[in-house]
Amino acid sequence: DGGITQSPKYLFRKEGQNVTLSCEQNLNHDAMYWYRQDPGQGLRLIYYSQIVNDFQKGDIAEGYSVSREKKESFPLTVTSAQKNPTAFYLCASSYQTMFREQYFGPGTRLTVT
Amino acid sequence: QKEVEQDPGPLSVPEGAIVSLNCTYSNSAFQYFMWYRQYSRKGPELLMYTYSSGNKEDGRFTAQVDKSSKYISLFIRDSQPSDSATYLCAMSARYQGGSEKLVFGKGTKLTVNP
């Protein structure tokens, strides 16, 4: 089955630690995205990538980093510089560009204490 | 004025009711319109997408786009308790020069009561 996988489903970290969230897709999509979802805030774009080895900052990139070494994979690192890292993180992909419909993974709930 | 406005609800209806979910937008460049369903603690699931004005039907769901009024709707017929979720609209624009933008509404929480 084609789809997007995110792991782990729940993640707990101590403040000051970096943490990496995994996102893999087998839809053969060129573009991949990371969003953060907080109650009442909607989806906010963190980073996106439309091609391997290239990525762009979204609206709230500060305190996050990404890499895109393979078409199928787009890991997100939440660094200790991110002031409010506790959130629900969603990875998505789309065919070619941001203009088209996006397909989402199941999400990772990150809790930092 | 926000680019995309969506009433957060909550909206509560009895089973079998027709549900109408709506979004308004201010950016006339939006051309591509989508609806997602998100169950609690899950990722959004794409329900429907359309590239034009008018209606698009898929089973119990109908998406309607009125570009002249900058208004989109999702209708759910014969609503079921399993339709209880948050529904997000999304819309995208492509500009001359190649830049693109995708904006999500904040979602409407729907509960269908048995």
Image (cartoon, coloured by chain):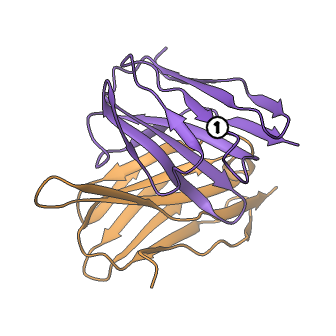
Return the x and y of residue B110 as percentages of the image width and height: 69, 62
**Does any portion of residue B81 appear in the rendered image?**
yes
Q: From the image, tell me which residue sits under label 1.
A: A78
Q: In this picture, is B108 found above or below A55?
A: below
Could you say whether the residue bearing mark 1 is in a helix, strand or loop? strand
Q: In this picture, is A51 found above or below B85?
A: above
* Tint applied to chain A in the drawing: purple
Question: Which kind of residue does numbered mark 1 sit on?
Answer: Val
- In the picture, which chain is orange? B
**Does any portion of residue B59 appear in the rendered image?**
no
For the point 55% across and 51% down, the residue is A62
Pinpoint the chain carrying mark 1.
A
Return the x and y of residue A18 as percentages of the image width and height: 70, 32
Residue B49 shown left or right of residue A47 in the figure: left
Furthest-right residue in view?
A: A113
Residue A100 shown left or right of residue B17 in the figure: left
For the point 88% across and 43% down, the residue is A113
The 10 Å Cα crowd at callout 1, few under 14, some 14 to 19, many 20 or more, is many
For the point 78% across and 38% down, the residue is A16
Q: Nearer the viewer, residue A16 or B45?
A: A16
The count of marks equals 1
Write down the quadrant of residue B70 in the picture: bottom left
Return the x and y of residue A96 as percentages of the image width and height: 26, 35
